[in-house]
Amino acid sequence: MAPRTRCKSSTFRLPCAQSPVLLIRRSLVRVQVGEPEFKAASKDAAFLRLALKCLGAVNQKMGFMRKDLSRAASGGVMRYVVLALISWATIVLPAGAADYRVGVAPDWVVPIKPAADLPPPEKVVNGEWALLSDVQTRVETAGKTTYHHFAGKALDSRGVQQVADISFVFDPSSEKLVIHAINIVRDGQLIDKLRSARISVLQRETELEYRIYDGSKTVHVVLDDVRIGDIVEYAYSRSGLNPAFKNQVAGGSGMQWSVPVAHTFARLLVPATRNITVTTRNSSIQPQLTEAKGYRDYRWEQRNVAPIKIDDQTPGHYDPYAAAHWTEFPDWKAVVDWGAPLYQPPPQAGPALALAIDRIRQVAASPAERVQAVLQLVQRDIRYLGIEVGQGSYVPNSPDVVFQRRFGDCKDKALLMVSMLRALGVTADVALANTRRGRLIESLPPSPLVFNHALVRVNVNGAKYWLDPTRSPQSGDLAHLVQADYGPALVLASGQTALISMTPKLSAQMRTDVHSVFDATAGVDQPVRYTIRTTHRAEVAERLRSSIAANGQAETQSDYLNFYAKRYPGIKVAAPLKVEDDPVSNELVTTESYAISGFFGAEKDGRRLAYVRSAEIRSRLRQPETLIRTAPLRVDFPDWIREVTEVKLDSDWKVTPSSGKVKDPAFEFQHTTEGGGARATYVLTDHYRALAGEVPPDAVRNYAANLETADDMVGLTLRYKPKGGVAGTASRWDGKYWTLATGCLLAVWALMLGACRLSRPEHRQANKSLVMVFMSVCAILLLAARNLPNGWIVQMSCVAIACIGSWLLILVAESAPETHFLHGIGKADVLAERKAAERTLIKGMTKLPSTFMWIGMTLGLLHMVS
């Protein structure tokens, strides 16, 4: 499971899985007003220069030339003219106009007109139909220009909201923005909205939560008078190239999104003298290639592009969208050659940094100890803060500067760590990786743009360690230290020509052990004492250690309490959370103590029911939200947990021991239930281990079925019988039911004995025998129901007693006098002489033994099947 790192992510831009018309991020922070700065001037010439600086944006609109204004400055009235012009510009010009200009599209752009008369497809979302995505890039001798042209149609009121709100982003430190057009097409008529649109330039700091300031700006356009059925079309271009790339270019263009697009056009113009590799990913469409006027012209064009909906819970490397890529870096060695000089440590450290290095050299003798000391210093003392403007997006700051100001981003901290380690005689290099996309970068063409993070690879006695200086302070020696695992990485060292996998080996040191105890020995009407002792190791320990340090122990305990309260509403804290930290072995042990009231719930029929659940294991066995998938399912990996749950009762509940295993390509699971006897303690042991980080789409159903099988094994259901203290389903003949049943039985017995006294003298003895047999069987069955559990053995015994009782009734009836109506119960000739009601009663009595035998056999078969 990849750790939560803070790093620059804006450098990695794959085709966005959103509408090509509305790629807007609403979380805009600082607003740039765009007003010019004024300073007092003692001379007209100085004042005019400031005025001209403010009027630079209006020269194109008004047709004034700087030389004309300068020539007129000699007249005294000119000062007031300039003041009037400045006032006019402040009122008329949109805020932030100094950050962009308005102009016609470059002459090399191929004009594309959006189709306005096509019927919308069925899968339009948010009421907006994307009619056109037109992106054209021209690589110049120095730099490049990218022309963007989009059009969308509002199909309903939601679509109006979407198309009337436009945003696009640029980097003012290395790019120039030109807005070419903002139009509305209504009923075939073109309405120019460029002059009336409200255009604002906003400071775009969308990665503030990661403490990154990149200086990008967003042009935000709000249109008025947009109606249902309107087509909003806009175009702009961005020119420039980050100087960190040394005029080497790389980029791409999306060709598919999560919404349908009527027409897509992508184009790349490159000088014929430059070697640029062009590839297409996730598509069989190849570019049309022509060459003219010293340029190679690549074009990708599609119509009615179908959308792709990505399932939830997909791995970060999954990206099914079609895209075109180009790069001037022929291989990964070229990227190493570009990046290695940027991350070359200075030949000598400054005084402050040198002093820190000497201190470590004195206290840490071995290379492993020095690595540990440097890592802790950089993680602990250098806070994370990235000012990534212009070249700062890719070029690290000097280690001396970073150490002196005590902050830096991933690049700065990685170079600082490498510089210190090399000064201490340890082999270390900076490596580039992508924390979000992982192994997807293996399928992308070589380029610095595919990376979003820098870390350090260390070589100690031949063993390689991948260390991330941006993580929260890590404890422990190298043997127990959690290494970074972001998939493939590019080490910026001499001789490196390919990506290297940084996947570390799995070991038992990564396992989480949970030992929980439900203590119900005080009785079912008393609160159950519930304790959980968890041994967290490796990355889990580091995350929890960081969380407790950031949020406090009290908030951590509150989170735990609410987690268990979902299962046990009557839970309360019995003792404060106890935390034991062993930083050397990187283990963190937490002990939780709770009291659960109402653990044994009361059911309507009087039974007491309780559920024992292994909470940590069950959280790993949740069902996927989507089973019918086209994308792989993400699984947390590595993930290894062993949970032992003890249940202590006041008596032996006769719980049947059980065990089971589940083996899936993505995980393995084992369960055992054992114990009981005089100790009245049952032990549930569950073991879960993830074997892969994802499940293929066609295997998700089987994976979900195996999860369900494992989940059925987890935990224990307890049914309590208040009197008797044994397991099983409680009898309904408790309390008032027992009193009522006993009273009814005694009343029937009295009535039958009274009837015997009133019968004929020669019949009394037979009647008394019949009553005694009937009442004895009823009394035995009632006592069994009152005092024995409702198990299958008790049920079979009751059926046997009823069968024997019915057979005794028949024997007594056969010995009755000839004048008794039961005499000759088994003789057909005698039975024929009886009245109809007597015959029915006699036939029912004769069938009782066989009926009870069939009932007993059925119960036995049902028990065997279950």
Image (tube, grey):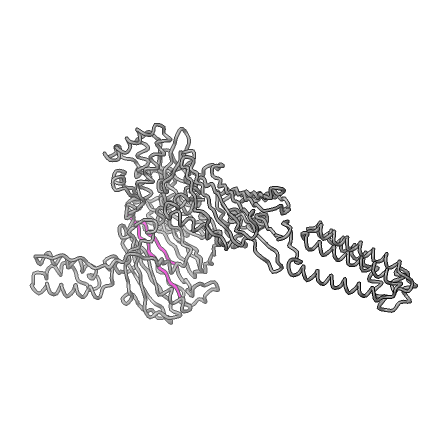
Quarter location, residue 364? top left
In the image, is residue 864 above or below residue 379?
Answer: below
User: Of 324 and 717, which appears nearest the observer?
Assistant: 717
Instruction: Single out the residue that lies furthest toward the bottom.
Output: 187
Image coordinates for residue 43, horizontal then vertical, percent: 8, 57
Q: Is residue 697 left or right of residue 440?
A: right
Image coordinates for residue 292, horizontal then vertical, percent: 34, 51
Residue 36 drawn in magenta: no
Image coordinates for residue 621, horizontal then vertical, percent: 53, 49
Specify the principal SS of the magenta part: strand
Q: Is residue 438 left or right of residue 397?
A: right
Can residue 691 be seen at all in this image of the molecule? no
- Tell me what residue is drawn at x 83 percent, y 55 percent: 808
Image coordinates for residue 554, horizontal then vertical, percent: 40, 49
Residue 141 drawn in magenta: yes
Q: Which residues are magenta?
A: 133-153
- Tell me what residue is drawn at x 80 percent, y 54 percent: 804
User: Of 543 and 558, which appears nearest the observer?
Assistant: 558
User: Of 530 and 242, which appears nearest the observer?
Assistant: 530
